[in-house]
Amino acid sequence: MASRKRAGFSLLELLAVVTILGIIALVVIPRIASSSTTAKENACFQNKSEVNGAVERYFFNNGSLPANLAALNNPTYFPDGIPACPVSNATYALDAVTGRVTGHTAGAH
């Protein structure tokens, strides 16, 4: 008898590879989705910190807190404009008493 060479993969081998790829996808895809959300939340907290820093610079330059964020919308404080929350696309608001950004804490956007 002549020896016969295999020309391809068996159905069982292909099934094993597809199963392994499916398991890998089940592990990786949720991590990618959650890391995007985490990145947006971290960017929101960074933006909030930058706005609060700009409020402090405004206070040191002018001797009073700004009435609203529109007073900071100039090249001295935000050359590219006041950032918006990357999670909700909402604009930030100032607390009139404390001069700090309101909301956007503990996941509330």
Image (spheres, rainbow, N blue to C red):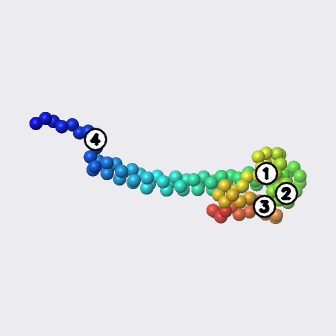
Between the residue at mark 3 and the residue at mark 4, the CA separation in whole angstroms equals 67 Å
Residue beneath disc 2 = 66
Which residue type does callout 1 highlight? Ala
The local crowd at label 2, few if under 14, some if 14 to 19, many if 20 or more residues have their Cα within 10 Å, is some
Residue 81, position as x, y percentages in the image: 77, 49
- Examine the image and state in which quarter residue 52 appears: bottom right
| Foreground: disc 4 or disc 1 | 4
Element type at mark 3? loop
Instruction: Single out the residue that lies furthest toward the top.
Output: 2
Mark 3–mark 4 contact, CB under 8 Å?
Answer: no
Residue beneath disc 4 = 8
Between the residue at mark 2 and the residue at mark 3, the CA separation in whole angstroms equals 9 Å
**Residue 54: numbered disc:** 1
Residue 54, position as x, y percentages in the image: 79, 51
Asked whether residue 57 appears in the rendered view, the answer is no
- Residue toward you, 68 or 90: 90
